Image (cartoon, rainbow, N blue to C red):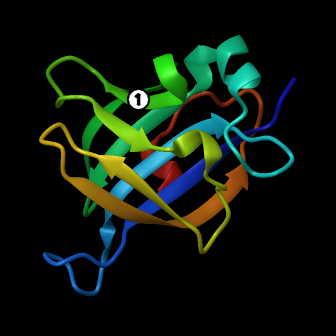
Amino acid sequence: MSTFYHIRLELAREPSHPHGDPHAGWDVVAALDEESRLDLAACRAEPDRCRIRRFLQDATLATGRLRHTLGDRWLFDLEPGDAMDETGFRLGSERFVVGEYVSIIAPDGVSHTYGVERVRPLDNDSPEITGQDV
């Protein structure tokens, strides 16, 4: 059984947020390989464990699943009614290590950069992201 991790992504500096915003971002639960990259085989083997949560301040804005799709594309598949899906930019080749950056493309095509702020292993019996993980 692969190790799943809670990955905390916080909005990095961009024109509308010149200092970034640690209160806006994503919590991701996914399996990582020995190089700290998304483990496709493990995520496919246990897709229900691959969860996402979009947050702003202390509020959950949307929840859903991290899914791999065609062309090595990773999708932030949000629950119907929460928001439109978002796409990771080259997430399959990114390393999820504190201090690294990843980009997520919003439904309007605008890319936002997030800093990897936390990566910690989860208990194998804990498939969900909760407010306690924030």
At which x and y percent is residue 7? 58, 52
Does 55 sit left or right of 41 as displayed? left
Q: Can residue 69 be seen in this view?
A: no
Q: Is residue 9 visible?
A: yes
At which x and y percent is residue 61? 22, 43
5, 18: nearer the viewer: 18
At which x and y percent is residue 47? 60, 16
- Give me the residue at 60% from left, 75% from top: 99
Residue type at mark 1? Leu
130, 68: nearer the viewer: 68
When asked about the image quadrant of residue 86, the answer is: top left
124, 34: nearer the viewer: 34
Residue 48 in the image: above or below residue 39? above
Q: How many marks?
A: 1
- Give me the residue at 73% from left, 26% from top: 125
- Give me the residue at 87% from left, 23% from top: 1
Does 11 sit left or right of 50 as displayed? left
Residue at which label 1 appears: 75
Disc 1 secondary structure class? strand
